[in-house]
Image: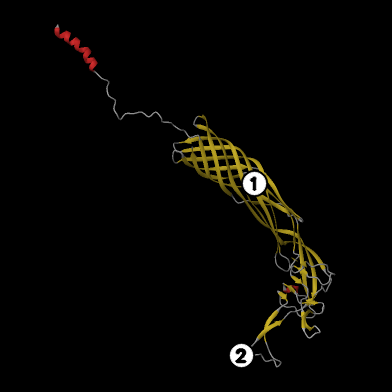
């Protein structure tokens, strides 16, 4: 009885002696962990588009008239004019520069121009065919009026350029497909070249100058002319210097030409398609700004397919150049170049389809195809008697794109 009572008294004491269990010192919980899901994807890469074309057409004019202010030459001049310098495509006839040394009457000598005899010692010509059988040298000027040969089309080289786009995840999905909004811009080049023979009407002006009975010097020829010759005495024996060598000097070999045209001036016209060729060149670049919806579908763990379509706005800056090359019957090639630069803004649309591969949690690569349609624009060159135009088509452009993805 006493033992039971003792046990009952010990129970509350034992309960009071118990303490809470001690927690392990290496067990803890971090309550600051935040899970971030990237909502943006940036794509940076290269896009190449093919299909741009240009249609070239128009009429032009090439003039060979010599303009040399230093020599006072202003083309062939009026036929009846006297004492003027005349410039031709294949030669020149300038004012006589011959001089003579005379006594001024006081026992001193002075240099004065020779009394005019209707000839000049300052002239030139280029081709042997200019020397005529009647003892004259024919001088020519040429003009070529280029007819409009109609449209000639040329595809531009594939224009490669950089591109940057951003996609934003809208949080909306349909099954595995997620919907995004896309915006971006790209830069591509335009480069079209075309060379074509042109039908043209050629006008040739001819003036003839007499050689006064002398033979024509070998072409090409430019007077005054000189040569180096051995000095001889009255007996025809060469002068010998102190070193025993023959002495040389400068001898005037100029063949004078009539200062004024000797025969009536003639003007002829002809038409051909071989004397003139045009080199058309359109070069520039265009920026494409685009925006639209995009849809993304995962393929396995590392791949994703995306498609996008929407509106595009193109800003195109181009320079249109036409080089006119005229090969006349005599003289050098005649070249004339005209050009004009301008800018145009064109609305359009685009479509892309891509395959993306995940490389890391936030980085990847992509490759795809691209389509763009931005219509066309006209560009012209109007300069006096020159009127060239081109139509540049930026519709139905297609190509490839590739680069890197960054998610953030």
Q: Is residue 284 found left or right of 19 in the rendered image?
A: right
Helix, strand or loop at mark 2:
loop
Structural distance between the alpha carbons of marks 2 and 1: 78 Å
Q: Residue furthest right?
A: 80
Q: Is residue 380 visible?
A: yes
Residue at (54% x, 44% y) in the render: 401
Q: Is residue 292 above or below residue 98?
A: above
Residue that label 2 marks = 242
Q: Residue furthest bottom?
A: 235
Tell me which corner region of the image, top left, top right, bottom left or bottom right, holds residue 102: bottom right
- Which quadrant holds the N terminus? top left
Helix, strand or loop at mark 1:
strand
Q: Residue furthest top?
A: 1
Q: Is residue 119 above or below residue 347?
A: below
Residue that label 1 marks = 316
Q: Residue furthest left?
A: 2
Residue count near mark 1 (Cα–Cα under 10 Å), binned few <14, some 14–19, many ≥20: many
Query: Which-is-in-front pick, marks 2 and 1?
Result: 2
Q: Is residue 28 above or below residue 127?
A: above
Q: Position of residue 5 (x, y in %)?
A: 17, 8
Q: Position of residue 224 (x, y in %)?
A: 73, 77
Q: Position of residue 144 (x, y in %)?
A: 76, 61
CB within 8 Å, label 2 to label 1:
no
Q: Position of residue 54 (x, y in %)?
A: 66, 50
Q: Is residue 133 visible?
A: no
Residue 162: which disc? none
């Amino acid at each position: 009885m006493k033992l039971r009572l003792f046990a009952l008294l010990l129970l509350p004491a034992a309960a009071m002696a118990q303490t809470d269990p001690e927690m392990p010192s290496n067990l803890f919980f971090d309550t600051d962990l935040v899970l971030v899901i990237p909502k943006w994807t940036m794509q940076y890469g290269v896009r190449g588009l093919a299909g741009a074309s240009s249609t070239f057409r128009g009429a032009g004019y090439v003039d060979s008239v010599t303009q040399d202010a230093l020599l006072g030459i202003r083309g062939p001049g009026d036929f009846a004019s006297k004492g003027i310098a005349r410039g031709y495509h294949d030669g020149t006839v300038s004012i006589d520069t011959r001089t003579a040394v005379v006594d001024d009457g006081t026992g001193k000598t002075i240099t004065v121009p020779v009394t005019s005899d209707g000839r000049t010692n300052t002239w030139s010509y280029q081709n042997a065919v200019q020397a005529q059988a009647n003892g004259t040298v024919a001088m020519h000027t040429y003009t070529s009026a280029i007819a409009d040969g109609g449209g000639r089309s040329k595809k531009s080289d594939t224009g490669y350029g950089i591109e940057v786009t951003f996609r934003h995840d809208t949080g909306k999905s349909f099954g595995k497909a997620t919907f995004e909004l896309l915006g971006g811009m790209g830069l591509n080049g335009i480069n079209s070249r075309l060379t074509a023979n042109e039908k043209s009407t050629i006008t040739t002006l001819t003036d003839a100058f007499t050689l006064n009975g002398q033979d024509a010097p070998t072409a090409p020829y430019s007077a005054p002319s000189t040569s180096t010759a051995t000095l001889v005495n009255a007996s025809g024996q060469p002068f010998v210097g102190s070193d025993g060598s023959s002495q040389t000097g400068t001898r005037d070999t100029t063949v004078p030409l009539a200062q004024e045209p000797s025969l009536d001036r003639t003007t002829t016209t002809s038409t051909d398609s071989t004397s003139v060729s045009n080199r058309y060149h359109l070069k520039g670049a265009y920026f494409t700004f685009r925006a639209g919806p995009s849809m993304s579908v995962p393929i396995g763990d590392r791949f994703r397919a995306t498609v996008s379509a929407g509106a595009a706005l193109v800003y195109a800056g181009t320079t249109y150049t036409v080089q006119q090359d005229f090969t006349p019957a005599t003289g050098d090639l005649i070249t004339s170049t005209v050009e004009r630069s301008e800018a145009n803004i064109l609305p359009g649309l685009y479509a892309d389809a891509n395959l993306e591969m995940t490389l890391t949690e936030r980085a990847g690569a992509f490759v795809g195809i691209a389509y763009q349609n931005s219509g066309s624009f006209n560009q012209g060159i109007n300069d006096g008697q020159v009127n060239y135009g081109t139509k540049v088509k930026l519709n139905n452009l297609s190509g490839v794109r590739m680069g890197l993805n960054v998610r953030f």
